[in-house]
Amino acid sequence: MSSLAQRICGIRYLRQLSSMTRYRRGLMLAALAVGAMFLALQVASGDEGPFTTLFSFIPNGVSFPNPNGASQTYSANGGGIDLSGPFFQSLGTNGRACSTCHAPGDGMSVSAANVELRFLWTQGTDPIFRPVDGSNCDHDIDVSTAAGRYEAYSLLRTRGLFRIGISVPANADYAVASVQNPYGCNETDTISMYRRPLPATNLRFLSAVMIDGRESSPATGTTKILFSNYPGALRSDILHQAMDATNGHAQASPPLTLSDPRLATIVNFEMGLTTAQAFSNRAGLLNAQGANGGPKALLGQTFFISMNSSVHTLLPQFEQPGGLVTAGDGQSTPAIFNTFDAWADLPASDPRAAVARGQAIFNSKPINITGVAGINDDVSAGGLVAGGIPSLRGTCGTCHDTPNVGDHSFPTPLNIGTGDPGAVNVSVNLGGLDISYLPSITVCKADAATGLPTNNCKTTTDLGLALIDGKFDHVGKIKGPILRGLSARAPYFHNGSARALLDVVRFYETRFGFALTPREESDLVAFLSAL
């Protein structure tokens, strides 16, 4: 059975195609894409269609196509993905499972393109389309007709965004002055945030759980992840997140408790997963000729909290201990990725050489980091010591420092401006991204003595960490994502504002004066798409 599944979905067999005619190769590739697409969609939707009926197990090495090639997800437990486990079961009341929003075919997240396909396939009745968080607002909507659902779920269809309603903390040192929400959710006590779902894979490299860190915060009764408590704190935070997601997104009734054994099974399943791009339309197999692309190499990747943090080197008070090879060794390297080192000496015309050049740009191209809340200002978020650096000469790896993974190796909520409207045109933020489809939220710091709002106000589209711990200084601060498997889960940034990886690159060019030639842009996109 596993051999048949691999032949339907596995681009690992592409080498066999080299001896075929172009016509036969085209037919085979079309069959691979169609088979993988239907398997991915049926697994995500929970349908008992022909593919999920036939396959109850996805072996390691099965590939799922995406616009830039194909990704794979490896499991360290049992040699593959067991589709009969609780991660793929509906544990709530609305038909959703974890896999509804964390699909193997979408790098254990969801791509907006495949959400749109699921809408067309089911006319908006797929479990992902539920008013609890899938609709633009949860009131004054019509989901009784296909046309009504098409409108109500427009942000989910086009940007892959879920609406996350979070109450303003009672102890907040700010007041919500106004909410201008184009979809009607203008409440000022519970704020609607619109966010992409983070991948439920590569989790052992996390230093905080959820985009705003709310599942790793004392403010929510969860545990901050430290060198001294990793991986225990990470596992307990993911367990709490699995419970909250099932009770909230899946509307479990009665609510699940932390002692439910199915939640522990979900955590074990997720902690064993690694996902990465395995095949590139431009460069071919990403583990060829000595390269270490694909998810299998990640199974043995070393990690500990504060590993290789250059910011830790500059400001040792951030987190202790730091290091590269071992904790406290005082070492770090700007060469965050060495995945494609083996391709560095290939002829310049070889598409694989472009990937290696992009890796070198990521590792070494200077960026003048300014105006980033969490680095250049007060850095007290998460209990860190105050004392920012007004201007920091860094690289992409300054914030994406975890070796061969690309997230931050210790909790560092930052605001680089992806959710903040620009000063001239509120529809365009600092990097030129269109965020006009998001609400505009203005909050003002409260006077410490009177509690009344002051004139110190900020306008943003996402309050970030401030909506968890209630601190005005933390407005807009969020964590950076893991970069592996990017090609499977477009669009990008927490709010889906970058449609493609080139948009991501150009945001950094505009935001930080990160000057790239057209070839450098292309090379960096080639690298990011190969992760």
Image: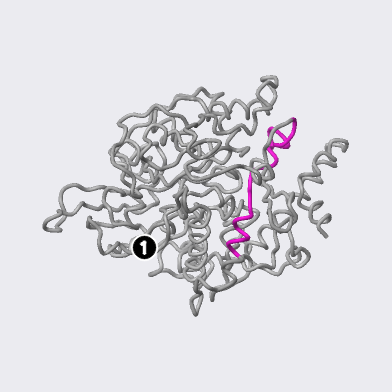
Segment colored magenta: 266-289
Q: Which part of the image, by quadrant, shows the C terminus?
A: top right
The mark tally for this picture is: 1
Closer-to-camera residue (201/19): 201
Establish if 47 lies above or below 304: below
Residue 268 in magenta stretch: yes
Q: Secondary structure at mark 1?
A: strand
In percent of width and height, residue 521 lies at 53, 28
Residue type for callout 1: Ile
Q: Residue furthest left?
A: 450
The answer to which quarter of the image holds residue 166 is bottom left
| Quadrant housing residue 497 | top left
Residue 364 percent location from the top left of the image: 51, 25
11, above or below 160, in the image = above
Residue under the image location 50 percent in, 40 percent down: 327
In the picture as drawn, the residue positioned furthest to the bottom comes out as 254
Give the image location of residue 159, x and y in percent. 49, 52
Is 431 a magenta residue? no
Location of mark 1 (residue): 166
Q: Residues within 10 Å of mark 1 (few under 14, many from 20)?
A: some
Say left or right for 426 vs 144: left
Which quadrant, please, contains the N terminus?
Answer: bottom right
